[in-house]
Image (cartoon, grey):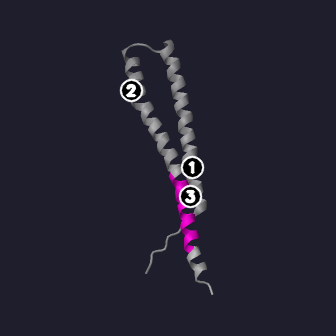
Amino acid sequence: MTEKIEANYDELERLSSVFMQECDRVQDMLNTVKNAMGNLQIGGWMGRGADAFYAEMNDEIVPATIRLQEALEEGSRITDQIIVTMQQAEEEAGNQFKTYRL
């Protein structure tokens, strides 16, 4: 017995859209954080604690947030590719039946 594989295209498209919406939200948040950090750096907060904060933000938090954004974008791209691949597979499978029609 063969395994049945199905794709719910509406749900996959929704998922791809959710990935991109979250990617955009992360970008907006990152811009807000960077702007706030910039305001602090021009004199709002100085000293060893501030230097440690800026270093951690620039060396760890911002790069990790960018990786999250890239992962969400990749999730959307891969989900879109799954849709295309499944549609192609369905079309190819359907063509097999067209060949054998009487």
Q: Nearer the viewer, residue 4 or 94?
A: 94
Residue range in magenta is: 78-93
Mark 3 element type: helix
Residue 20, given in percent of the width and then of the height, sits at 57, 45
The quadrant where residue 50 appears: top left
Mark 2 element type: helix
Residue type pointed to by label 3: Leu
Residue type pointed to by label 1: Val
Earlier sequence position, callout 3 versus callout 1? 3
Residue linked to disc 2: 56
Residue 55, given in percent of the width and then of the height, sits at 39, 23
Earlier sequence position, callout 2 versus callout 3? 3
Q: Residue at x 61, y 79 (%)?
A: 98
User: Would you say the residues marked 2 and 3 are in contact, meaning their CB atoms lie under 8 Å apart?
Assistant: no
Q: Is residue 12 left or right of residue 48?
A: right
Q: Is residue 88 magenta?
A: yes
User: Would you say the residues marked 2 and 1 are in contact, meaning their CB atoms lie under 8 Å apart?
Assistant: no
Q: Nearer the viewer, residue 73 or 55?
A: 73
Residue 101, given in percent of the width and then of the height, sits at 61, 84
Residue type pointed to by label 2: Glu
Residue linked to disc 3: 12
Q: Dot 1: few (<14), some (14–19), or many (≥20) neighbours within 10 Å?
A: some
Q: Is residue 8 left or right of residue 64?
A: right
Mark 1 element type: helix
| Prevailing secondary structure class for the magenta stretch in the rendered image | helix
Residue 41 in view (yes/no): yes
Residue linked to disc 1: 18
Q: Dot 3: few (<14), some (14–19), or many (≥20) neighbours within 10 Å?
A: some
Residue 8, given in percent of the width and then of the height, sits at 57, 64
Residue 7 in view (yes/no): no
Quote the CA–CA distance across marks 2 and 1.
29 Å
